[in-house]
Image (tube, grey):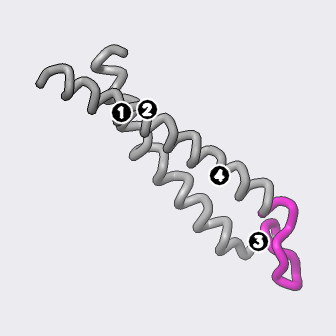
Amino acid sequence: MPTDLRFRLAGLVVLGSFPWITFVKNLWQDGSGLAFDDAGEPTGYFWVHLLLAITSFLLGTAVGVIGLRGVRALRDDRA
């Protein structure tokens, strides 16, 4: 794996995590009526978007782990 790609993959986790964490926080605090009904129960909109955010966060974390493993392997090769 090229060195540059290793560092990019590791960096994607940091850059990709913040928007999804913010999105879930805003989804949880939604007052527009999309995420929660009048009784305060989560709607289908809430569950679908929460699942999308969690899936994206987990996939981003997996890519980051691959990148970090590549960076560690690069250090081991140089030592």
Location of mark 4 (residue): 53
Which one is earlier in the sequence, the residue at label 4 or at label 3?
3
Location of mark 1 (residue): 69
SS state under label 1: helix
The Cα–Cα distance between marks 4 and 3, rounded to whole angstroms, is 19 Å
The Cα–Cα distance between marks 2 and 1, rounded to whole angstroms, is 5 Å
The Cα–Cα distance between marks 2 and 4, rounded to whole angstroms, is 20 Å
In which quadrant of the rendered view does residue 72 lie?
top left
For discs 3 and 2, the disc positioned in front in the rendered view: 2
Q: What residue type is labelled 1?
A: Arg
For discs 2 and 4, the disc positioned in front in the rendered view: 2
SS state under label 3: loop
Which one is earlier in the sequence, the residue at label 3 or at label 1?
3
Point out the stretch of residues depicted in magenta.
34-46
61 relative to 26 in the view: left or right? left
Location of mark 3 (residue): 32
SS state under label 2: helix
In which quadrant of the rendered view does residue 68 lie?
top left
SS state under label 4: helix
For the point 79% across and 61% down, the residue is 47
In which quadrant of the rendered view does residue 5 lie?
top left
Measured from the top left, where is residue 74 in percent x and y?
A: 24, 24
